[in-house]
Image: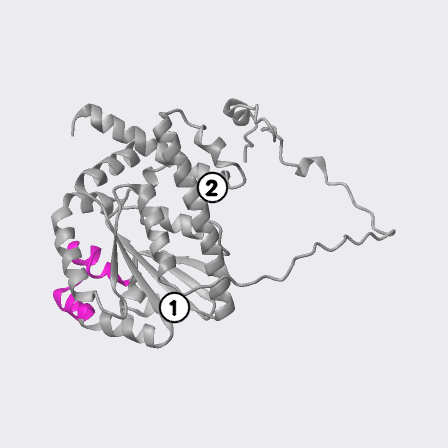
Amino acid sequence: MGEDELRLRLHKDLLDGYDEELEMELEDRNTDQVAGVLTGSKEYRDARQRYFQALFWLQGELVKLQDWVVHSGHKLVIIFEGRDAAGKGGVIKRITQRLNPRVCRVAALSAPNNHEKSQWYFQRYVAHLPAAGEMLLFDRSWYNRCGVERVMGFCTDAELEEFFRSVPEFEKMLVRSGIQLIKYWFSISDEEQEVRFLGRIHDPLKQWKLSPMDLQSRRRWEDYTRAKEDMLSRTHIPEAPWWVVPGDDKKAARLNCITHLLSQIPYTEVERDEVVLPSRERRPDYVRHPVAASMIVPEVFEQRTLRSSIGNADKHKSTP
């Protein structure tokens, strides 16, 4: 990859990062306005506009899905696996963005402690499984055993083989209990992962995403490839098949994954009762007490125009 091409790819990755924030903040704005926020060619602006329109429509369908899950008592588990920087977190964020966190939860478990290491391997994951009317998204799952644990030597060969013997039966048991289990693997090319890692290294807002384990995964690319191929071949079962999402194009991957997810669930739109805002009761004996000025957060930024600068904000930093 030449220096000029790398620079362009990093620039595009930076713009994608800005888009992530725009998606969070611009839900009430017209996508025609959104498309003109950043400079770029008409083709690029049109593509961004189509992306936002598709995303917002799909998120509307996810809300319908959520209503149906609650209404029907459905139990849904979605597993997201893939290489580091493949886009798992991005699609999880878009799925959960408009949903009720009490209905749609995310489980992103850290490395097991000594107590958890002594438990049955699946035990700490079972504790997060959904009840009726809930959706659970695993941001990495029990497949850590045949991924990072295998490649980095955190489990023995015997433990790995026991996992491969157990996981099909474990997942069949979940399905028999009434849980719908959907498994996604986000695939990313060697070249694209390099670009995204470099983007994280040079972006202070993303450096926290890079761990020493991530850097090791980059060095051991081929080991992870062999582990992934083994995992897909040995755990792809009819009750819970794997679905591979091409992830080099972040935006397309998000839209394709959400579209596929919706197609896997027999949801229907649940009719809602008409909501009527009740009139506020006013009592003659009610007196509103003023709030002490010392308790008010300083208005450093003006609400409508945000004329205040970051410099002005720095002046108002409080000292403990």
**Residue 162 appears in the figure:** yes
Quadrant of residue 313 within the rendered picture: top right
Residue, disc 2: 24
- The residue located at (50%, 39%) in the rendering is 25
Q: Is residue 297 left or right of residue 84?
A: right
- Magenta residues span 142-164
**Residue 204 appears in the figure:** no
Residue 263 location in percent, x, y?
A: 36, 59
- The residue located at (42%, 68%) in the rendering is 75
Between 87 and 159, the one lying in front of the other is: 87
Using the numbered discs, state the Cα–Cα distance from disc 2 to disc 1 in whole angstroms.
30 Å
Residue, disc 1: 127
The image quadrant where one finds the N terminus is top left
Q: Which of marks 2 and 1 is nearer the N terminus?
A: 2
Between 139 and 320, the one lying in front of the other is: 139
Q: Is residue 137 left or right of residue 29?
A: left
Q: What residue type is labelled 1?
A: Ala
Q: Is residue 145 left or right of residue 105?
A: left
Circle 1 Cα neighbour tier, 10 Å, few/some/many (<14 / 14–19 / ≥20): few
- The residue located at (62%, 32%) in the rendering is 298
Residue 174 location in percent, x, y?
A: 33, 73
Magenta-colored stretch includes residue 155: yes
The image quadrant where one finds the C terminus is top right
How are the residues colored?
Answer: one colour
Quadrant of residue 281 within the rendered picture: bottom right
Q: Is residue 220 left or right of residue 213?
A: left
